[in-house]
Image: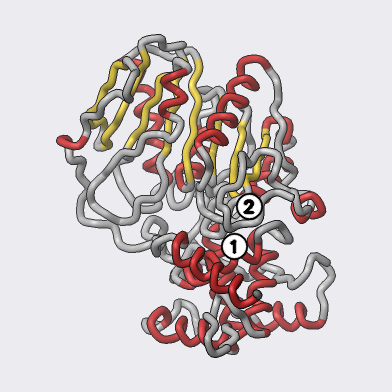
């Protein structure tokens, strides 16, 4: 029976594990908007006024329902990779927004890659342009997925008087610390396999060294798949250490590790994500753990003493306004409701914990509500989950009713078997454990 279950999980991972979207790369020589692709139709059964075009080098979409309630929702898209064509994404909430009288607008940004600065400035420019196209909105909300969550988190701090409420989803709310997490995975894998390597990684890192580490972490049982499905002692130690760098003990973690393990090996960045000068990753002061006890065991002390340490280049992540990788301070002044899947390890669940800590340090926790969805994918929310979250955010902004959320900082709560059940609408996959 155990063998059958393992093979079922193999099928799950092969079926749903995402394509290798690798952060970083080299910017193209020029970006462009194909204006022939900009026109878009109203949704069936709806009557709206739609605008499209290019503004300050970015493509834009604007849609206003005939029963416009006076509110605007700005949508920030996620990471595109370094491709020259600038493209647009409509919010998943589009049908809900139109049905409830909200106008929405989205920018392609004027660059691609991990350029949060462009996302923030171009979304702000579109907000101002909306005033000329349609008129000044009564209230303005901002939302986005993944890197778009990072854009949202920076924009609401950069322009505190523009927005009334924010809904960053699956967002990079810990800014540079996401890239530190990807570094953590690499150095931990190196440590537990006894792989000696210097940073920056050599040219054969992904082609020779990574496959060797994957083989050294798998159980190697004939007839069974290897890493990350079946693990030997070294593989189980890696899984344990990554747990405490990605959010701690929590439901679905072992399945999430199987889902993301090989993908994370593909994020073997050399610290250059193409938008900041030099290396942006560091772990010089990171304390690695193998359990939830903050006191270091002998094994943890040896791990922290011997693991490869990396420091950033002087300007790699130095705060510089919107340049480089813009930081999110957590000093918020409007209601913010976040969503994250508990098993996400591309943009790890720990991003929400980092954000909650930063907001608390500014004494603004009363303005933050966080919700956890039981899924292992990245941004794999159901439409109803996003719609409920947005409706609750609007009620908070308009009527002062602070919605319920999940505690992301209490380790006991996060580790509970039913954590995330409150806002998850049904099972996200028949193959993943449902709420108990």
Along the viewing direction, whichever of 217 and 77 lies nearer the viewer: 217
What element does badge 2 sit on? loop
Residue 417, position as x, y percentages in the image: 76, 54
Check disc 1 and report its element: helix, strand or loop. helix
User: How was this image coloured?
Assistant: secondary structure
In the rendered structure, which disc, 2 or 1, sits on the residue that comes first in sequence? 1
Q: What residue is at 67 percent from the left and 34 percent from the top?
A: 368
The numbered disc on residue 365 is none
Res. 311 visible in picture: no
Give the side of residue 425 with respect to residue 213, left or right: right
Residue that numbered label 2 is attached to? 342
Q: Quadrant of the N terminus?
A: bottom right
Q: Return the mark for residue 256.
A: 1
Q: Position of residue 17 (x, y in %)?
A: 46, 62
Tell me whether the residue at label 2 lies in contact with that at label 1, contact meaning CB atoms closer than 8 angstroms.
yes
Query: Can residue 271 be seen?
Result: yes
Where does the image place residue 43, in percent across and percent down from the top left? 33, 25
> Is 76 placed above or below 397 here?
below
From the viewer's perspective, is residue 225 above or below residue 288? Answer: below
Q: Nearer the viewer, residue 34 or 379?
A: 379
What's the distance in space between the residues labelled 2 and 1, CA to CA?
A: 9 Å
């Amino acid at each position: 029976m155990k063998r059958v279950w393992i093979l079922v999980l193999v099928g799950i991972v092969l079926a749903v594990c995402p394509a290798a979207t690798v952060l970083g790369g080299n910017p193209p020589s020029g970006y462009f908007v194909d204006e022939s692709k900009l026109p878009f139709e109203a949704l069936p059964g709806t009557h709206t006024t739609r605008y499209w075009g290019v503004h300050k080098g970015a493509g834009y979409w604007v849609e206003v329902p005939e029963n416009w309630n006076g509110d605007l929702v700005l949508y920030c898209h996620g990471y595109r990779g370094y491709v020259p064509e600038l493209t647009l994404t409509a919010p998943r909430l589009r049908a809900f927004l139109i049905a409830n009288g909200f106008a929405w607008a989205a920018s392609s940004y004027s660059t691609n890659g991990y350029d949060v600065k462009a996302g923030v400035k171009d979304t702000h420019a579109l907000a101002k342009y909306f005033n000329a196209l349609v008129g000044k909105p009564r209230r303005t909300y901002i939302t986005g997925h993944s890197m778009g969550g990072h854009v949202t988190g920076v924009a609401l701090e950069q322009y505190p008087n523009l927005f009334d409420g924010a809904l960053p989803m699956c967002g990079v709310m810990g800014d540079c610390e996401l890239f530190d997490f990807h570094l953590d995975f690499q150095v931990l894998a190196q440590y537990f396999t006894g792989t000696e390597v210097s940073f920056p990684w050599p040219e054969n890192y992904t082609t020779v060294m990574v496959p060797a580490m994957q083989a050294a972490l798998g159980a190697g049982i004939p007839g069974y798949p290897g890493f990350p499905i079946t693990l030997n002692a070294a593989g189980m130690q890696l899984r344990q250490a990554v747990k405490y760098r990605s959010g701690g003990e929590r439901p679905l973690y072992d399945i999430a590790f199987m889902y993301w393990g090989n993908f994370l090996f593909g994020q073997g960045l050399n610290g250059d994500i193409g938008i900041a000068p030099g290396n942006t990753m560091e772990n010089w002061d990171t304390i690695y753990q193998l359990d939830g006890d903050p006191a270091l065991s002998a094994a943890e002390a040896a791990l922290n003493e011997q693991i490869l340490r990396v420091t950033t280049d002087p300007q790699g992540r130095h705060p510089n306004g919107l340049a480089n990788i813009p930081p999110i301070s957590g000093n918020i002044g409007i209601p913010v409701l976040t969503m994250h899947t508990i098993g996400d390890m591309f943009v790890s669940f720990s991003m929400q914990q980092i954000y909650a800590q930063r907001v608390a340090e500014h004494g603004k926790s009363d303005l933050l509500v966080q919700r956890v969805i039981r899924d292992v994918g990245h941004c794999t929310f159901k439409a109803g989950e996003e719609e409920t979250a947005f409706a609750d955010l609007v009620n908070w902004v308009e009527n002062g009713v602070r919605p319920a959320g999940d505690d992301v900082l209490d380790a006991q709560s996060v580790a509970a078997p039913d954590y995330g059940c409150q806002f998850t609408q049904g099972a996200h996959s028949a193959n993943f454990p449902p709420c108990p």
